[in-house]
Image (spheres, rainbow, N blue to C red):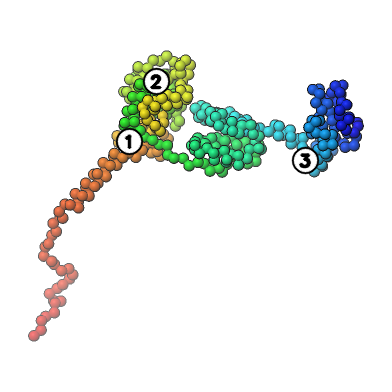
Amino acid sequence: MAKITKPLVDSLGSGDARRIIRDEELAGFAVRRNADGSIVYLVEYRAGRGRGFPTRRLSLGRHGALTPEQARRAAKDVLASVLAGQDPAGARGARRRELTVREVLLSALEHHWKPKRKPGTSKAFEEMMHRTLIPEFGTKRLSDLKRVDVRLWHARQTHRPRQANLDLAILRKALSLAVDDELIAENPARGITPHPEKSRDRVPTDDELRAVWNAIDQGPIRESARLLLKLLVLTGCRREEWRSARWSDVDLDGAVYRLPDAKAGARNVPLSGPVLALLKLASARSQWVAPNDRGSGPLTFSNIRDAWAAVLVYAGVTGLRVHDMRHAFATRGASLGANALVLRDALGHKTLAMTSRYVARQTDPVRELTERIGERIVATVKSPPAPVDKGVYRPSGNLRKSNIPRKTA
């Protein structure tokens, strides 16, 4: 034990490696030479009153960055905080053990979304995390993530409002689980106003649908993608329902596709003549109806996205999504007079309210109806009035001859 001064620290050699020298004037202040030759200043204290509490050791910094006197003053500050009931070394250790936002997101994915959501949903969430949330917030400790950080990031995403709202919802749920697990006290992503979203429903016109179909036939895309896109147009199914389709689920003789795990539960999709013709011409080189290039799995989401982009360019159509083919199917079914319950089952919806969102208001039927109403009104106002019965007037009331006064002379 000696007073820690600069000459003393400079005199520490390789023979003093890992040796702790404690200051004789300030209890708890010490210096140590490490095996790599670096010298660090330390402070030691007991985390509580009594021998039952553990002894803590906290590094103050390296010699060179700190002089002995600066380290001494830092040690006094730490010891003063200990007397006030704090535990600086424990807090620093807890911070090192604190989870990052990345770890919280991946934990939510593994222990919440994957067990409770469909594989396609959890896969989409994972892609969104790695594309946006983890690069933006992943390295932050939970306690360092502030509401202002999330709010300002979200406010900058005006070029992608819908996707930003989805990203925010994922982050909010993951942090909500962290609150439930008592990892943080409050959710910094809660209460942030989402971006306004414009309606995404878009029903292709007959000309657009014709151009898209021809582009699917003639455009530079994979044969598997060609088949998949045509099936989506002709059946109104969701993208994932045909992307994950296996030949074992397709009964060509019974003209039905048995969906074992659709969004609204297991259901059977009747296959029309054009669909059967497509499937019978397709080569079953894999267990998947629309396999990837190796046949080892279905087409990837990026395969479908790239194929659709090529189709739109070839067709000269803009602003149309793959999912809009589902709207096209529903709207044309409604225009043919399909019963709402039948249309709901054809689309695989749980409720009629959801089906109504897929059926666009068409101009032609409304125009036809207004023409017919207008003609009826014009015919009414221009037609001659109906004949009125002009019979002899008979006064009402109980008029008796005896009640009429006699004319007096």
Amino acid, disc 2: Pro
Amino acid, disc 3: Gln
> Would you place residue 153 above or below residue 382 in this image?
above
Query: Considering depth in this image, is 277 or 381 the residue closer to the camera?
Result: 381
How far apart are labels 2 and 3 at the CA level? Answer: 68 Å
The residue that label 1 is drawn on is 334
How far apart are labels 1 and 3 at the CA level? Answer: 70 Å
Say whether disc 2 or disc 3 marks the residue closer to the N-terminus: 3
Determine the residue located farthest toward the left in the rendered image. 409
Q: Position of residue 403 (x, y in %)?
A: 15, 76
How far apart are labels 2 and 1 at the CA level? Answer: 33 Å
Q: In the rendered view of the protein, which quadrant contains the C terminus? A: bottom left
Comparing marks 2 and 3, which lies closer to the viewer? Answer: 2
Q: Is residue 258 visible?
A: no
Q: Quadrant of residue 339?
A: top left
The residue that label 3 is drawn on is 86
Compared across the picture, whether 133 is left or right of 245 comes to: right
Q: In the rendered view of the protein, which quadrant contains the N terminus? A: top right
Count of numbered labels shown in the rendering: 3
Q: Secondary structure at mark 1?
A: helix
